[in-house]
């Protein structure tokens, strides 16, 4: 029984490590986010209240939102168009960049995958 628990924990840790490695690259995200910056600001801190601040948001939230824009589940003509061309890696990179910027302090909310 104890061996089974240890094996399960080891597997869970390996899976968590693999997920951490699959995260985006913030440097690549900065380059890929140039089109985003015209509305959301260079560092994701929009000065226009019409556009949400992206700086400091959790990457999984940003990825979730981009996937919803891409699928059409979330409606916004501008964002649907931008997200349509993004790959999953692009989304992860952009999310890594904006989430690494200093922004608003937000509470963690676990988004459904």
Image: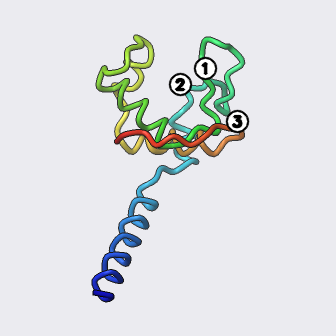
Name the residue beneath numbered marker 3: 103
Q: Establish if 97 lies above or below 51.
A: below
Residue 32's spot in the image, x, y percent?
Answer: 50, 36
Instruction: From the viewer's side, name the closer residue of 26 and 65.
Output: 65
Name the residue beneath numbered marker 2: 35
The residue under the point 63% across, 45% down is 100
Between the C-alphas of marks 2 and 3, the distance is: 19 Å
Residue 5's spot in the image, x, y percent?
Answer: 33, 80
The quadrant the C terminus occupies is top left
Name the residue beneath numbered marker 1: 38
Crowd rating for badge 2 (residues with CA inside 10 Å; few <14, some 14–19, many 20+)? few
Q: Residue furthest front?
A: 1
In the structure shown, which secondary structural element does the residue marked by tag 1 occupy? helix
In the structure shown, which secondary structural element does the residue marked by tag 3 occupy? loop
Between the C-alphas of marks 2 and 1, the distance is: 6 Å
Q: Are marks 2 and 1 in contact (CB under 8 Å)?
A: yes
Residue 96's spot in the image, x, y percent?
Answer: 54, 45
């Amino acid at each position: 029984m104890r061996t089974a628990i240890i094996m399960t924990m080891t597997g869970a840790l390996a899976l968590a490590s693999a997920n951490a490695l699959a995260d985006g690259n913030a440097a690549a995200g900065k380059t890929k986010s140039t089109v985003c910056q015209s509305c959301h600001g260079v560092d994701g801190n929009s000065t226009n209240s019409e556009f949400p601040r992206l700086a400091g948001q959790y990457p999984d939230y940003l990825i979730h939102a981009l996937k919803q824009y891409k699928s059409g589940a979330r409606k916004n003509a501008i964002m649907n168009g931008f997200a349509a061309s993004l790959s999953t890696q692009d989304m992860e990179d952009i999310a890594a960049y904006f989430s690494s910027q200093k922004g608003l302090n937000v509470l963690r909310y676990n988004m459904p995958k």
